Amino acid sequence: METFDGLNLRLCHELQAAGCPMASHLKEQLEFEEFLAQLSTMFVNVRPDEVDSRITLALQRIVEFLDIDRSGFGEVTKEGFRILQSYELPGIPRSPRVLLEQEFPVYAKLIQRGEVFRMPRDLPPDAIRELEYCRNTGLRSNLTVPLKSMGRVVGGLGMTSFRHEIDWSADLVNRLSLVGEIFTNAIERKQADLELRSREASLSLAHEELRQLAAKLLNAQEEERRRIAREMHDDWTQRLAILGIDVAQLAKESDIPEKMRQPLHAMQNELVRLAEDVHALSRQLHPSILDDLGLVEALRSECVSFANREHITVDYSSKGILGDLPKDVALCVYRVAQEALRNIAKHAAVDEAKVSLIASESEVVLRVEDQGIGFEVESMRSQPGLGLSSIVERIRLIRADLVIDSFPGRGTTIEVHIPRERNNS
Ligand SMILES: Nc1ncnc2c1ncn2[C@@H]1O[C@H](COP(=O)(O)OP(=O)(O)O)[C@@H](O)[C@H]1O
Ligand SMILES: [Mg+2]
């Protein structure tokens, strides 16, 4: 299909043939406009990684359209002007890759000033290096158009001829400035995309570092809990037991005043309760029962002590053969159950809860559920509390999946799915 400009061009040909004096000017203008339109389309919807190859193609088109020998574009950096890409006809000297201030100081300065300039015409007599370059390479004519972004010079677009001189008329210079704008636009988009990607990369790095830190903190916390639990269990409970025995013996002595007997009995009972509390707390801190009796029994015992402590009935069940779960996986499941139960006591406003551990060939599933007040899962995701965030991190560390199902007024279910093959890896 013929384009609008194509149609106009044909009309110009006919006008020219008919001897119209304005026809050739009009034709030139239309040809340039069509050229500009083609260049612009080359950069429409172009992917950032395609920008460079499109620029090379555009440079080739410029060379062909203007009937010149070389065209190139470069960017202004802190070090000076650097040619990024160029296209030249066969046999034509390539653009110097770097045009640092020291090598071509006048050229670099002119570009940085952001003015359109021609070589060798606009070169001052002290541009010794540049004039030498023109002489040595046989450069006859060059035009450099500055590329500006938000009023700042970011680069330049150069067009060079070695074969003949070119009349860089004001009209032509104006039009080539438009070509420069197309280039600037494409480069800006690429730059923006690169920045976005680098920000994304550093964000995901920061995210990863944060996760590693969370993992370290969780491990350190477990380590510390284990240490304190051992101390409480091995040392404090022993000492309390000995103290209890001493008090019991004292109470049996025949020569103590009668009125001391009752308080001594009370002290003995209190010491027994204290020993039990210390023991229970030590088990909560680090469940040695996990190592001794395994996850199924450890969870059962946790449910029983939770029920006694919080006066909430817990229906605990386990199904299937669990087999040997790695220690970190068992501890994670235990901790998630502990936190989920704690949350039920703290938030759910119920007097019943259900805990189940279901083992199948493909996965192990822990489910903790209540029929309490529930909550909005989505709003919780954006601002989770410490309990839920540590659940999420723990689950991620053992490469399991977490499903939180809750709705205001309809209770809460927390499920951990641990695929068998991921545990073995
Ligand atoms: N079983 C539950 N029933 C109702 N609300 C819950 C339950 N579990 C968690 N929530 C809600 O999720 C929030 C975040 O829980 P969590 O991260 O453990 O923090 P915390 O318990 O310290 O408030 C709670 O404040 C509560 O609003
Ligand atoms: Mg909590």
Image (cartoon, rainbow, N blue to C red):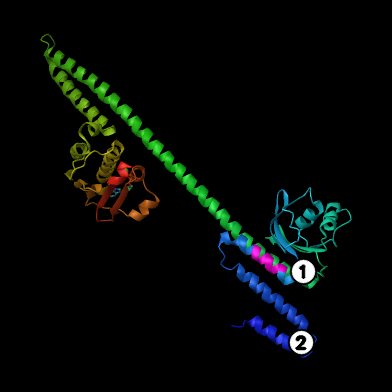
Magenta stretch encompasses residue 179: no
Give me the disc on residue 16. Answer: 2
Helix, strand or loop at mark 1 = helix
Can you name the residue that lies furthest to the bottom here?
18
Image position, residue 187 (x, y; %): 63, 60
Helix, strand or loop at mark 2 = helix
Give me the disc on residue 173. Answer: 1
In the picture, the quarter occupied by the N terminus is bottom right
- Horizontal side of residue 121 vs 197, given as left or right: right
Front residue (pair 219, 425):
425
Q: Report how far apart the C-alphas of labels 1 and 2 lie in the structure.
A: 25 Å
- Horizontal side of residue 52 vs 314, given as left or right: right
Q: Quadrant of residue 191?
A: bottom right
Image position, residue 109 (x, y; %): 79, 54
Front residue (pair 45, 257):
45
Q: Which residues are magenta?
A: 56-63
> Ligand 1: does it lie within 8 Å of the C-beta at label 2?
no
Tell me if label 1 and label 2 are in contact, CB under 8 Å: no
Image position, residue 148 (x, y; %): 70, 61
Up/down of 232 relative to 388, above or below: above
Image position, residue 206 (x, y; %): 49, 45
User: Dot 1 surroundings within 10 Å: few (below 14), some, or many (20 or more)?
Assistant: some
Up/down of 397 relative to 137, above or below: above
Most common secondary structure along the magenta stretch: helix
At a point 14% along the width and 14% down the height, the residue shown is: 249
Residue 189 visible? The answer is yes
Residue 178 visible? The answer is no
> Ligand 1: does it lie within 8 Å of the C-beta at label 1?
no
